[in-house]
Amino acid sequence: MSGVWVFSNGVVRLVENPGEYQGSSSRRKVLVHLASKEVITSYSVLESKLLSLGWERYYDDPDLLQFHKRSSIDLISLPKDFRKFKSMHMYDIVVKNRDEFEVRDMQ
């Protein structure tokens, strides 16, 4: 089962094709590194930011880019192809790196 959970008027429902949902935002999202105000445009940029924050790269799965922080149980797993880097991956990075990154609407 895939799609987006939408909360509207006190009801939660699964929208299979979120692009067709009239209440969904069609704006593309970008991940921003707050300290430098830099938009993350590639995995090499993201990797340098994560490494500076204490994340280590894992090379176990050839289909994923993975990062782990020794001081926590957190694992960031990203698709190998940056074109498949979606907002759900961005929010995962934001949650695991509070006050370091932010997801914004692309202008």
Image (cartoon, grey):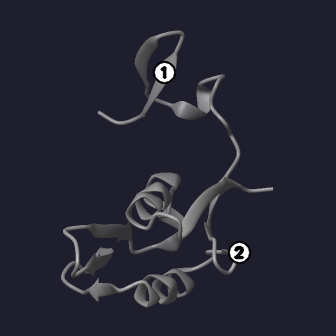
Q: Which residue is more in the foreground, 45 or 36?
A: 36
Residue located 59% across and 24% down the image: 21
Residue located 46% across and 63% down the image: 98
Q: Which residue is more in the foreground, 10 or 63?
A: 10
Q: Residues within 10 Å of mark 2 (few under 14, many from 20)?
A: few
Residue type (three-letter) at the residue carrying disc 1: Phe
Query: Helix, strand, or loop for circle 1?
Result: strand
Q: Position of residue 19 (x, y in %)?
A: 60, 34
Against 28, residue 63 (above or below) is: below
Residue type (three-letter) at the residue carrying disc 2: Lys
Q: Which residue is more in the foreground, 98 or 60?
A: 98
Residue 75 placement: quadrant: bottom left
Residue located 41% across and 88% down the image: 51
Residue 20 placement: quadrant: top right
Sequence-wise, which precedes: disc 2 or disc 1? 1
Against 101, residue 21 (above or below) is: above
Q: Position of residue 53 (x, y in %)?
A: 42, 84
Q: Position of residue 67 (x, y in %)?
A: 31, 78
